[in-house]
Image (cartoon, rainbow, N blue to C red):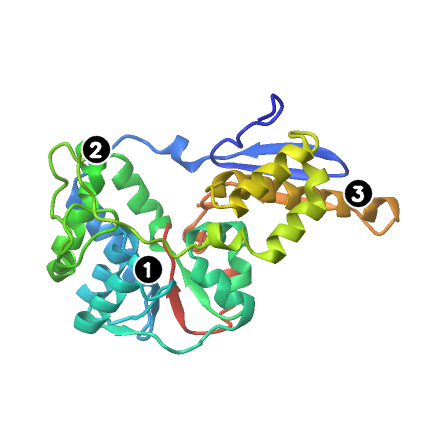
Amino acid sequence: MHPQIFKVPAGSVLHFRNGALRIESDSYIDSIRGQNSDPDQALWALNDEVAFWSDKNPFLSLSGGFDSRLILSCLLKMGIKPHLITMGDAICTDVQVTRKIAARLTELCHKQFLSGLARYYFEQRVPNFYANGVKMYLVSTSWRSPFFSRKWIDLIWNLDDRWKLGSAWHRYAIQKNCAALLGFSEERGYNLRRMLPKPPVFYWSCYMRRTPYVDYVKAAEWYRSKYIQEFFRGNAALVTEIMNPKAAISVLESHRLGKDRTRTLSFLLTIIWWMRVVNAGCVSDCKGEGTSSLDVNSRATSLTNRGDAIGGSVGSSYRRKINPRTNFGRL
């Protein structure tokens, strides 16, 4: 939308201080050496990582996808039945799949073990997990994400491409750990009743019939609410550098009247909020209230040592075990 807007490179951190922008890049993936690897080695590495972080009463954020179900298979293989937590209303795909799994294999958590924004961010899972920082979660719980294991990443990175396409390795690992988990449908899958042990032929084709998916995110509905409509109109001038505010408001209005402009509005609302933060920092500097600092971390994880396995930019703060409860997140 603007010739001077660029995507942040992978493995990078943007530092915005005193009106200047600086970028640091340190991608662990670029340093991975080639080695012989097989799917069983990768599975052993992930099982070991889950075992290392597990306690006797973990909570798992479960969806209808592959990552969280794979973590569940690791826990069930160890004989641990975690409390399952998910988000959405009764018709949401994640809720339906999670309820079926809980009824047969473990337990669905109905306890409000987190409160306020901590609970909201937990339920938002991946999108806000990194955007808001793991430190926030550590106020009330001990987060663990086993997919940040260096050993597992090294092994999975060196697998043949046939194991990476169509979630082939995930299917294999789930089947090896707990084949019963294949008895439940997969997110946007090919069978309403089960997860396939292997990706079907031509799985990538647009002509393949997939199961419908009902999302837990109600952004389209939220953006039609009175509050968002008023907030957007009151701050539309903040997008002037990339878009005419009147054009932005016309997008908002077309969405309110029924046309789906969710993705565009999500982008514009992000820009508006970013500009509010930057402008607030500039005001703070002008008043002599200290240096404004805003760091945007685009890395999935710092991956510096086992202590950083939580991910984000937490560093070693996980060692302050405020709450012994373990909660597994997903990459």
- The kind of residue tagged 3 is Cys
Question: Mark 3 sits on what residue?
Answer: 282
3D distance between C-alphas at marks 1 and 3: 42 Å
Is the residue under label 3 in contact with that under label 1 (CB below 8 Å)? no
Left or right: residue 268 compared with residue 166: right
Q: In the structure shown, which secondary structural element does the residue marked by tag 2 occupy?
A: loop
Residue picked out by circle 1: 92
Which label lies toward us, 2 or 3? 2
Which residue is label 2 attached to?
204
Residue 142 picture location, percent across and down: 45, 66
| Amino acid tagged 2 | Trp
Marks 2 and 3 sit apart, C-alpha to C-alpha, by: 48 Å
Q: Nearer the viewer, mark 1 or mark 3?
A: 1
- Circle 1 packing at 10 Å, graded few (<14), some (14-19), many (20+), is some
In x, y percent, where is residue 66?
26, 51
First-in-chain label (2 vs 1)? 1
Question: Which secondary structure lies at badge 1?
Answer: loop
Q: Residue at x 25, y 49 (%)?
A: 212
Judge whether 123 appears above or below 175 on screen. Answer: below
Mark 3, Cα crowd under 10 Å, few <14 / some 14-19 / many 20+, is: some
Residue 316 visible in the snapshot: no
Q: Is the residue 126 above or below the residue 295 in the image?
A: below
The residue sitting at the right extreme is 287
Other-residue count near label 2 (Cα within 10 Å), few / some / many at <14 / 14–19 / ≥20:
few
Disc 2 to disc 1, C-alpha distance: 24 Å
Residues 157 and 268: in front is 268
Quarter occupied by the N terminus? top right
Q: Residue furthest bottom?
A: 111
Amino acid found under the numbered disc labelled 1 = Cys
